[in-house]
Image (tube, helix red, strand yellow):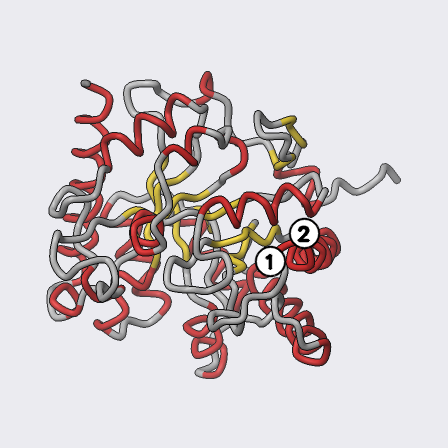
């Protein structure tokens, strides 16, 4: 019998040498996408959190709205299983609706200084990765959960801890992405996430930026220019108003792309120039949207993302 092809081989994670010295899984090449619209579009299900939809309905709304990727939350998948759902059946539903699981959002204290908490965090990370794998997913967010308050751990130690998480990901065939959290004492800035990814020394190290968090943490857009597109697989899209100011703005103030003051066109031009051809994942926590029809919200978000992309390409 011939050798069974592993899932990792199937999804084609080929390391690529990056402009900042960081190695990451290769994203789709420019030739594989229509340069008139170089990005894919994904829905992070927090955008519809307030409507309390079932996982099946979240999948259906995502597909009906016209997205090609979905980014669910582990807590919602846990609830789905608790209520009797099958993760493998859900994975088939996602695939049948023409969607890919581009990532997932979970929380485990992988970056903290406490050895016992990190040990428990790796157990939880393994559980989360198994959930993602069962629904056909490739990646999971790795925000600095548990390490948001000062004093922040030494970033070189955080890089070692990220490598341990990546090595667990090698085993589970799910890649953890260092997520920038702008309100956090740890990994609150893009440059900190880049340092941790670079110094991990792992070929699949990658970063998960977010428009809101770049603003909240005070990251310069100049930093994006140093990151080759293959250092990222997902980019969280949203916008924010001019008021409240950065010090007091919160996730709940996020608005549709193009409805705020974020420099989205500049961000998108940088991403395109640097070869990013991954997904733009709409991640909102706006209470007003949570009171509206979910399909209308999902469609509006996609239309507004595409409009901003078109504007960025025209200038």
Of 228 and 158, the residue lying toward us: 158
* Tag shown at residue 188: none
Task: Answer with the quarter of the image where residue 304 lies.
Answer: top left
For the view shown, which residue lies furthest in the front direction?
151
Point out the image quarter for the C terminus.
Answer: top left
Of 43 and 210, the residue lying toward us: 210
Q: How many marks?
A: 2
Residue, disc 2: 173
Q: Are discs 1 and 2 less than 8 Å apart at CB?
A: yes
Task: Answer with the quarter of the image where residue 111 lies.
Answer: bottom right
The residue that appears at 30% across and 46% down in the rendered structure is 237
Point out the image quarter for the N terminus.
Answer: top right
Residue, disc 1: 133
The residue that appears at 14% across and 61% down in the rendered structure is 244
| In this rendering, position of residue 15 left or right of residue 83 | right
Residue 305 on image: x %, y %: 22, 40
When the figure is inspected, residue 83 is found, relative to residue 154, above or below; the finding is below
Residue 254 on image: x %, y %: 21, 58
For the view shown, which residue lies furthest in the right direction?
1
When the figure is inspected, residue 10 is found, relative to residue 92, above or below; the finding is above
Kind of element beneath mark 2: loop
Residue 83 on image: x %, y %: 44, 83
Mark 1 is surrounded, within 10 Å at the Cα level, by few (under 14), some (14 to 19) or many (20 or more) other residues, namely: many
Of 77 and 230, the residue lying toward us: 230
Mark 2 is surrounded, within 10 Å at the Cα level, by few (under 14), some (14 to 19) or many (20 or more) other residues, namely: many
Task: Answer with the quarter of the image where residue 162 lies.
Answer: bottom right
Kind of element beneath mark 1: helix
**Marks 1 and 2, how far apart at CA:** 7 Å
């Amino acid at each position: 019998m011939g050798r069974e092809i592993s899932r990792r081989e199937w999804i084609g994670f080929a390391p690529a040498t990056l402009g900042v010295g960081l190695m990451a899984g290769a994203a789709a090449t420019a030739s594989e996408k229509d340069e008139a619209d170089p990005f894919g579009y994904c829905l992070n299900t927090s955008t519809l959190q307030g409507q309390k939809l079932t996982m099946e309905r979240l999948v259906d709304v995502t597909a009906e709205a016209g997205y090609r990727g979905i980014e669910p939350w582990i807590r919602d998948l846990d609830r789905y299983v608790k209520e009797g759902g099958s993760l493998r059946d859900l994975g088939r539903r996602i695939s049948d609706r023409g969607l890919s699981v581009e990532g997932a959002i979970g929380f485990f204290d992988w970056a903290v200084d406490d050895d016992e908490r990190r040990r428990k965090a790796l157990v939880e990370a393994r559980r989360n990765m198994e959930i993602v794998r069962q629904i056909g997913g490739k990646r999971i967010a790795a925000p600095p959960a548990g390490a948001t308050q000062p004093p922040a751990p030494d970033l070189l130690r955080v890089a070692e801890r990220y490598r341990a998480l990546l090595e667990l990901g090698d085993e589970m065939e799910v890649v953890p992405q260092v997520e920038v959290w702008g309100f956090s004492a740890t990994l609150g800035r893009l440059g900190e996430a880049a340092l941790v990814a670079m110094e991990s020394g792992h070929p699949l190290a990658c970063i998960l930026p977010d428009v809101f968090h770049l603003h909240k943490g005070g990251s310069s857009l100049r930093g994006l220019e140093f990151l080759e597109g293959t250092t990222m697989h997902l980019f969280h899209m949203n916008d924010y108003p001019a008021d409240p100011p950065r010090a007091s703005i919160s996730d709940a103030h996020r608005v549709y792309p193009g409805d705020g003051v974020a420099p989205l066109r500049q961000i998108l031009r940088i991403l395109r120039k640097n070869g990013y051809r991954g997904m733009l994942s709409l991640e909102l926590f706006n209470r007003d949207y949570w009171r509206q029809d979910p399909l209308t919200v999902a469609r509006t978000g996609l239309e507004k993302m595409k409009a901003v992309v078109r504007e960025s390409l025209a200038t």
